[in-house]
Image (cartoon, helix red, strand yellow):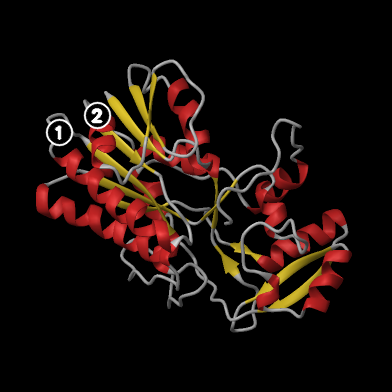
């Protein structure tokens, strides 16, 4: 078997590849890593091809002899790149893959931006059957289109596709900096969207933790997943007959409740709580289907997410560098 990976240099890719290569299940597989601006370190059983996913000749070269694809390459809010990378790139991959003699499975890593995460309302849990409702911006739109393209290639050509839809992916100390008030803040929302500059300065100068409130006035509930759990789900779905033609929500068993998170940090690390009203919606990404069908269960809950982020100590060779904000 031969697996093509796109996005191998990203957060998920860097965690997935060593787990895949060390797995007994996949010990006889080889890998092709299609890289563009950044390139992974050479490894045994891994062929590296450098070039753009939007270039037909590069995609054709990378796809030679491939049996499986794990597509993770993406750009965020970059309108000048969104169509070429996310739409044209996905189309070229699918077109090449459907014509391969030994094509077996195409796995897409998508995001809960396709269901609007905290920006769109849902009357109940967000399941795989919920309506797709992107939030404003090109990134969410491209994820909707990628999911639909893979779905339609199943109808058009019988292609075996599987989508893993993940919310905000955490690793290392990400969650700590997602709750930071200073310039070191990782991801969103930007505090200046909800607070005055003076309030932001006050909170950044002290030891505060944000307690976001949803538009109903209750604690915001927002979905997250640890990268290790997403990697475990990808390994569980790869070459799994139960994943044929399926879409799975891959998230923590419960969304993060900002009141619970803030109270935990107040109790364990003496933070002061800053309540912040927002127009955001509380949503619950339901992972029941993945747990039942893939025999997968996330291991990182809220306490583990917080403890892991606050206890993480970076090596000097591992500076905090954010390729994509959020």
CA separation in Å, label 2 and label 1: 8 Å
Work out whether residue 35 can be spotted.
yes
Q: Position of residue 238 (x, y in %)?
A: 33, 35
Badge 1 local density, few (<14 within 10 Å), some, or many (20+)? some
Q: Position of residue 148 (x, y in %)?
A: 26, 60
Q: Residue at x 17, y 52 (%)?
A: 153
Q: Position of residue 54 (x, y in %)?
A: 31, 46
| Quarter of image, res 185 | bottom right
Q: Earlier in the sequence, mark 2 or mark 1?
A: 2
Tell me: residue 24, above or below residue 288. above
Along the line of sight, the residue nearer the viewer: 55 or 73: 55
**In the image: residue 232, left or right of residue 103:** right
Give the residue at mark 2.
66
Q: Quadrant of the N terminus?
A: top left
Tell me: residue 276, above or below residue 239. below
**In the image: residue 292, left or right of residue 88:** right
Q: Residue at x 62, y 72 (%)?
A: 220
| Quarter of image, res 256 | bottom right
How many marks are shown on the rendered structure? 2
Classify mark 2: helix, strand or loop: loop
Tell me: residue 202, above or below residue 262. below
**In the image: residue 312, left or right of residue 139:** right
Q: Quadrant of the C terminus?
A: bottom right
Q: Position of residue 186 (x, y in %)?
A: 66, 56
Q: Are marks 2 and 1 in contact (CB under 8 Å)?
A: yes
Classify mark 1: helix, strand or loop: loop
Tell me: residue 113, above or below residue 310. below
Give the residue at mark 1.
100
Badge 2 local density, few (<14 within 10 Å), some, or many (20+)? many
Along the line of sight, the residue nearer the viewer: 61 or 145: 61
Q: Residue at x 49, y 57 (%)?
A: 167
């Amino acid at each position: 078997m031969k697996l093509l990976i796109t996005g191998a240099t990203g957060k998920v890719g860097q965690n997935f590849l060593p787990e895949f290569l060390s797995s007994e299940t996949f010990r006889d597989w080889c890998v092709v890593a299609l890289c563009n601006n950044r390139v992974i370190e050479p490894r045994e059983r891994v062929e590296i091809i450098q070039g753009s996913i939007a270039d037909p000749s590069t995609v054709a070269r990378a796809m030679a002899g491939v049996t499986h694809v794990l597509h993770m390459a993406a750009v965020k809010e970059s309108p000048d790149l969104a169509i070429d990378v996310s739409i044209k790139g996905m189309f070229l991959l699918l077109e090449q893959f459907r014509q391969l003699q030994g094509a077996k499975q195409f796995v897409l890593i998508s995001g809960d931006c396709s269901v609007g995460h905290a920006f769109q309302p849902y009357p109940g849990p967000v399941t795989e059957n919920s309506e797709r409702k992107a939030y404003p911006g090109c990134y969410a739109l491209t994820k909707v289109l990628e999911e639909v393209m893979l779905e339609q290639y199943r109808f058009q050509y019988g292609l075996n596709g599987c989508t893993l839809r993940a919310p905000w992916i955490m690793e290392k100390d990400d969650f700590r900096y997602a709750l930071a008030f200073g310039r070191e803040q990782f991801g969103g929302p930007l505090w200046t969207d909800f607070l005055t500059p003076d309030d932001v300065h006050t909170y950044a100068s002290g030891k505060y933790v944000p307690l976001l409130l949803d538009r109903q006035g209750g604690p915001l509930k927002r979905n997250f997943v640890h990268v290790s759990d997403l990697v475990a789900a990808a390994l569980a779905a790869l070459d799994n007959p139960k994943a044929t033609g399926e879409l799975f929500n891959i998230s923590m068993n419960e969304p993060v409740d900002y009141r619970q998170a803030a109270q935990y940090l107040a109790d364990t690390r003496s933070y002061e709580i800053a309540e912040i009203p927002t127009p955001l919606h509380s949503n619950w990404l339901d992972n029941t289907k993945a747990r039942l069908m893939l025999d997968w269960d996330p291991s990182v809950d809220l306490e583990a997410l917080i403890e892991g982020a606050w206890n993480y100590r970076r090596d000097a060779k591992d500076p905090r560098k954010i390729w994509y904000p959020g």
